[in-house]
Image (cartoon, helix red, strand yellow):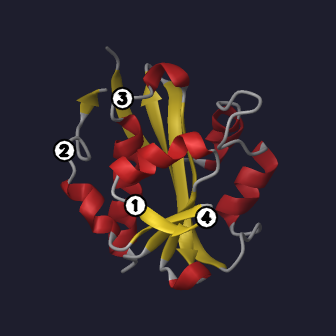
Amino acid sequence: MSTVEIREIELSQVPLVARLPQPGEAGADSPERMERYLRGEHHPHLALAPRQMWVAWADDLPVGYVSGHLTQRFSCDGELQKIYVVASYRRRGLGLRLVAELARWCGTQLARRICVNVGAESARPFYLAAGAVALQPHWMVWEDIRGVLESPGASARGAV
């Protein structure tokens, strides 16, 4: 099993990371849009600065990512913008580790209530398992995302 390291993205890595989602999969964005988001030039509804993104690396290849920003949407403090894990790394705890990176960052921003657009309904069980609850038909929320950090595996290092 590969060792997976999670690091903040460098803008030069955006084109490589943006190619991870396969056609039709949730979480996809063009490299240009992803870079504009990170630079603060693309603004999701009610988004605030700053924005952040982390990439999971295995054997020097990206295998997943998560991004988020502060927001005023739904009276939340922050929003999980995108999350993606390549198929061969799913159901091994990597998604939870990525959400935990966002939770740690949210803590530094004093952001607790974090929303996420569920996207594909098949993602709902993942968010439920990570502690989010229903907010609106297509949205879920962590009333206090710090709870993710208490989940087994959220701070796991090394093999996934």
Do labels 1 and 2 touch, CB within 8 Å? no
- Residue 157 image offset from top left, x and y in percent: 24, 36
Q: CA distance from mark 1 to mark 3?
A: 25 Å
Residue at which label 1 appears? 132
Residue at which label 2 appears? 152
Do labels 4 and 2 touch, CB within 8 Å? no
Q: Quadrant of residue 158?
A: top left
- Residue 22 image offset from top left, x and y in percent: 71, 27
Amino acid type of the residue that numbered disc 1 sits on in the rendered structure: Ala
Do labels 3 and 4 touch, CB within 8 Å? no
Q: Earlier in the sequence, mark 1 or mark 3?
A: 3
Q: Secondary structure at mark 4?
A: loop
Residue at which label 4 appears? 137
Q: CA distance from mark 3 to mark 4?
A: 34 Å
Amino acid type of the residue that numbered disc 3 sits on in the rendered structure: Val
Q: Is residue 97 left or right of residue 62?
A: left
User: Relative to 22, does residue 130 appear above or below in the rendering?
Assistant: below
Amino acid type of the residue that numbered disc 4 sits on in the rendered structure: Pro
Q: Badge 2 local density, few (<14 within 10 Å), some, or many (20+)?
A: few
Q: Earlier in the sequence, mark 1 or mark 4?
A: 1
Q: Badge 4 local density, few (<14 within 10 Å), some, or many (20+)?
A: few
Do labels 1 and 3 touch, CB within 8 Å? no
Do labels 1 and 4 touch, CB within 8 Å? no
Q: Which numbered mark, 1 or 3, is in the foreground of this view?
A: 1
Q: Is residue 132 left or right of residue 68?
A: left
